[in-house]
Amino acid sequence: MIEVIETGLYSSIQDKGRFGYENYGVPISGSMDQFSSTLSNKLLNNKEQDAVMEITMTGPVLKFYNKTVIS
Protein backbone atom coordinates (compact mmCIF):
# COMPACT_ATOMS: atom_id res chain seq x y z
CA MET A 1 0.00 0.00 0.00
CA ILE A 2 1.13 3.56 -0.71
CA GLU A 3 0.15 6.54 1.42
CA VAL A 4 0.29 9.92 -0.28
CA ILE A 5 1.58 12.41 2.29
CA GLU A 6 1.84 15.36 -0.15
CA THR A 7 0.59 15.26 -3.73
CA GLY A 8 3.30 17.34 -5.38
CA LEU A 9 2.60 19.33 -8.53
CA TYR A 10 0.90 17.53 -11.44
CA SER A 11 1.26 13.98 -10.13
CA SER A 12 -1.20 11.45 -11.54
CA ILE A 13 -1.80 7.77 -12.22
CA GLN A 14 -1.87 7.01 -15.95
CA ASP A 15 -2.22 3.99 -18.21
CA LYS A 16 -2.06 3.62 -21.99
CA GLY A 17 -5.39 5.40 -22.48
CA ARG A 18 -8.69 4.45 -24.09
CA PHE A 19 -8.74 3.62 -27.78
CA GLY A 20 -11.72 3.42 -30.12
CA TYR A 21 -14.00 5.93 -28.40
CA GLU A 22 -12.91 9.14 -30.13
CA ASN A 23 -16.10 9.21 -32.22
CA TYR A 24 -18.03 9.45 -28.91
CA GLY A 25 -15.95 12.40 -27.76
CA VAL A 26 -13.74 10.40 -25.39
CA PRO A 27 -10.06 11.32 -25.90
CA ILE A 28 -7.37 8.63 -25.88
CA SER A 29 -5.54 10.34 -22.98
CA GLY A 30 -2.98 8.14 -21.20
CA SER A 31 0.51 9.04 -20.05
CA MET A 32 2.30 12.01 -21.60
CA ASP A 33 5.49 9.98 -22.17
CA GLN A 34 4.41 6.62 -23.59
CA PHE A 35 8.02 5.50 -24.16
CA SER A 36 8.99 6.04 -20.51
CA SER A 37 5.84 4.41 -19.14
CA THR A 38 6.41 1.35 -21.33
CA LEU A 39 10.10 1.17 -20.40
CA SER A 40 9.31 1.55 -16.70
CA ASN A 41 6.83 -1.33 -16.82
CA LYS A 42 9.29 -3.52 -18.73
CA LEU A 43 12.05 -2.80 -16.17
CA LEU A 44 9.69 -3.89 -13.40
CA ASN A 45 8.49 -6.95 -15.34
CA ASN A 46 4.93 -5.57 -15.43
CA LYS A 47 2.49 -5.73 -18.32
CA GLU A 48 3.12 -2.95 -20.85
CA GLN A 49 -0.33 -1.43 -20.28
CA ASP A 50 -0.17 -1.36 -16.45
CA ALA A 51 -0.75 2.02 -14.83
CA VAL A 52 2.22 4.16 -13.82
CA MET A 53 2.65 7.16 -11.56
CA GLU A 54 3.45 10.15 -13.72
CA ILE A 55 5.26 12.90 -11.82
CA THR A 56 6.21 16.33 -13.17
CA MET A 57 7.70 19.44 -11.58
CA THR A 58 7.71 18.92 -7.79
CA GLY A 59 7.31 15.27 -6.83
CA PRO A 60 4.99 13.91 -4.15
CA VAL A 61 5.91 12.67 -0.69
CA LEU A 62 4.96 8.99 -0.49
CA LYS A 63 5.08 6.36 2.24
CA PHE A 64 5.39 2.73 1.14
CA TYR A 65 4.12 0.09 3.57
CA ASN A 66 5.57 -2.90 1.71
CA LYS A 67 8.88 -3.66 0.05
CA THR A 68 8.68 -1.67 -3.18
CA VAL A 69 10.73 -1.33 -6.37
CA ILE A 70 10.28 1.83 -8.41
CA SER A 71 11.74 2.90 -11.75
Image (spheres, rainbow, N blue to C red):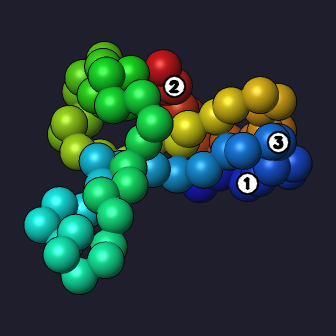
Q: Position of residue 44 (x, y in %)?
A: 33, 25
Q: Residue at x 80, y 42 (%)?
A: 9
Where's the N terminus, which quadrant?
bottom right
Q: Position of residue 18 (x, y in %)?
A: 25, 62
Tell me if residue 29 comes above or below residue 8 in the rendering. below
- On residue 12, the disc is none
Q: Which residue is mark 2?
A: 70
Q: Position of residue 55 (x, y in %)?
A: 64, 34
Q: SS of the residue at dot 1? A: strand
Q: SS of the residue at dot 3? A: loop
Report how far apart the C-alphas of labels 3 and 2 lie in the structure: 17 Å
Tell me if residue 36 comes above or below residue 20 in the rendering. above
Q: Which residue is mark 3?
A: 8
Estimate how packed mark 3 is, as few (under 14), some (14 to 19) or many (20 or more) residues with alpha carbons within 10 Å: some
Q: Residue at x 53, y 32 (%)?
A: 68
Any part of residue 40 in sight = no
Estimate how packed mark 1 is, as few (under 14), some (14 to 19) or many (20 or more) residues with alpha carbons within 10 Å: few
Q: Which residue is mark 1?
A: 3
Identity of the amino acid at label 1?
A: Glu
Q: Residue furthest right?
A: 6
Identity of the amino acid at label 2?
A: Ile
Tell me if residue 30 comes above or below residue 35 in the rendering. below
Identity of the amino acid at label 3?
A: Gly
- Dot 3 or dot 2: first in sequence order is 3
Q: Residue furthest bottom?
A: 24
User: Given contact means CB atoms under 8 Å apart, are the residues at marks 3 and 1 in contact?
Assistant: no
Q: SS of the residue at dot 2? A: loop
Q: Nearer the viewer, residue 47 or 34?
A: 34
